[in-house]
Amino acid sequence: AFGTALTERYGKEEVAKWYFEVWNEPNCCGGYPDTGCCGPSCGNQSMYVELFANTFKGLKAANSQLRVGGPATAQLAWIDAFVAGAAGAGAPPDFVSSHLYPTDPWANEVALSHTRDGFKNAIAAAADSVAASAKQHGRPPSTQFLLTEFNCGLGMDCADSFFSSSFIAYHALNSQGIVDRVPVQSYWT
């Protein structure tokens, strides 16, 4: 009903430009279901894939051109498992999304390197992982990876500081080499 209402209101061509990201950080507190933790071994991947597949199929039934993806996990988690699970459930994602902060302890289930370029390198590795997983599961290797949430650090009062502006400028310049694989990088307020 949601996909149909949007298509009727805004037109098929317009809503086909949008990204429909299913849920937010299913591997963290407030996730699906809320497990009270965040990181490797948190959340319930099979429950999330079921939620994603049902949402994917409902939106695609309303308008097959809608772009539906996820898992919007924290710390670049579940990327390969998500692509495999969603494809296996008959809901191969149109894009894969996740979140990362430079203060996170993990990135894609391994320790995040806190070197100068560790943040960008982790994102580039996630994009490579999406391409490889997509190809392995019958999707085009050009399947987009979207970093739909990041900022200067969690639990820090830095969002409006000169540290933040320096970080954003450095990250934006440093990411020019991966913009074809990671076209959306969204700074979270």
Image (spheres, helix red, strand yellow):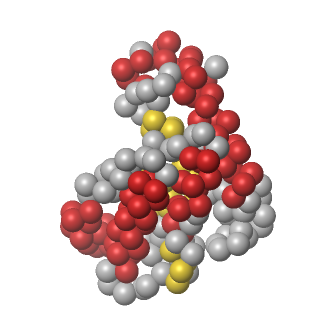
Residue 153 seen in the current view = no
Q: Position of residue 144 (x, y in %)?
A: 38, 50
Which residue corresponds to the image point at 53% horizontal and 62% vertical from the top-left? 80
- Taking the image as shown, residue 121 lies to the left or right of residue 51, namely left
Which residue corresponds to the image point at 47% horizontal and 30% vertical from the top-left? 66
Q: Is residue 157 above or below residue 58?
A: below
Residue 27 sits in quarter: bottom right
Residue extending farthest to the top is 8
Q: Position of residue 130 (x, y in %)?
A: 43, 59
Residue 106 sits in quarter: bottom right
User: Dividing the image into 4 quarters, which one contains the N terminus?
Assistant: top right
Which residue corresponds to the image point at 60% horizontal and 39% vertical from the top-left? 90
138 and 68: which is toward the camera:
138
Q: Position of residue 128 (x, y in %)?
A: 37, 65
Residue 154 sits in quarter: bottom right
Residue 118 seen in the current view = yes
Label count reads 0
154 and 20: which is toward the camera:
20
59 and 104: which is toward the camera:
59
Q: Position of residue 146 (x, y in %)?
A: 41, 53
- Taking the image as shown, residue 38 lies to the left or right of residue 84, namely right
